[in-house]
Amino acid sequence: MFSALIGAVMAAAGLLAMPWAVRTHNELACRVLGGGPQQSRAQLTERVAHLTETRADAVDAQAAELRRIERDLHDGAQARLVAIGLTLGTIEHLMTSDQTAARELLAEARESSAKALQELRDLVRGIHPPVLAERGLPDAVRELALTAVVPTEVTVSLPGRPRRRWRRRCTSV
């Protein structure tokens, strides 16, 4: 009987102390996990606005860099491959010994350079596909699905640029 009374008193004391224990645990966890001092809502709103702006600037800078890379690949490597094709054409006309074999090899070399040129163009389009720039992400994903080996169906519902959602992790109880 006495032990049942002690058990009931201890259970009541535990229930009364529970809110205090949970608050203490939350404060300790926030300090240990880096919650730090609580920021005001205005400070958090200002920080989110600043991060959104800097993220947009970074995305724009990265897009400009990709376009520069495309232009450099297009104007540099592609121009060299075209020059190789023209040079091989000139060499083809200058060869005097074993003309048939030389012409066949040179024709193959020209075809190879044309294939390399096409591959390079495809690579440039892959860096920044025109469909992505012209029609956006949903159509770019659909075009990618068309080239998939496995039959693929794409359903996209994207009203605009995805926004990052911020969550406050440590809150007081």
Image: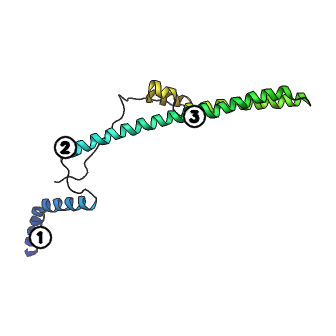
- Vertical placement of 164 versus 88: above or below? below
Asked whether, in this view, residue 14 is left or right of residue 96, the answer is: left
Q: Are marks 1 and 3 in contact (CB under 8 Å)?
A: no
Residue 133 in the image: state x and y as whole percent: 47, 27
**Amino acid type for the residue under numbered disc 1:** Gly
49 or 142, which lies in front?
49
Considering depth in this image, is 82 or 116 the residue closer to the camera? 82
Q: In the visual, does 169 lie left or right of 93?
A: left
**Badge 1 or badge 3: first in the primary sequence:** 1
Give the distance between the C-alpha atoms of the residues marked 3 and 2, in whole angstroms.
45 Å
Label located before the other in sequence (2 or 1): 1
Mark 3 / mark 2, whichever is N-terminal: 2
Q: Residues within 10 Å of mark 2 (few under 14, many from 20)?
A: few
Q: Which mark is residue 7?
A: 1
Amino acid residing under circle 3: Asp
Tag 1 secondary structure: helix
Tell me residue 43's x, y (percent): 21, 46
Query: Could you say where residue 26 lies in the image, as x and y percent from the top left?
Result: 20, 58
Tag 3 secondary structure = helix
Identify which residue is drawn at 52% across, 31% down. 144
Q: Quadrant of the C terminus?
A: bottom left
Q: Which quadrant of the figure has residue 1?
A: bottom left
Pick the front one: 163 or 72 = 72
- Given this view, does label 3 or label 2 mark the residue nearer the observer? 3
Which one is closest to the eye, mark 2 or mark 1?
A: 2
Write the residue at 88% across / 31% down. 101
The residue singled out by tag 2 in the image is 42
Q: In front of the other: label 1 or label 3?
A: 3
Q: Quadrant of residue 106?
A: top right
**Residue furthest right as drawn:** 97
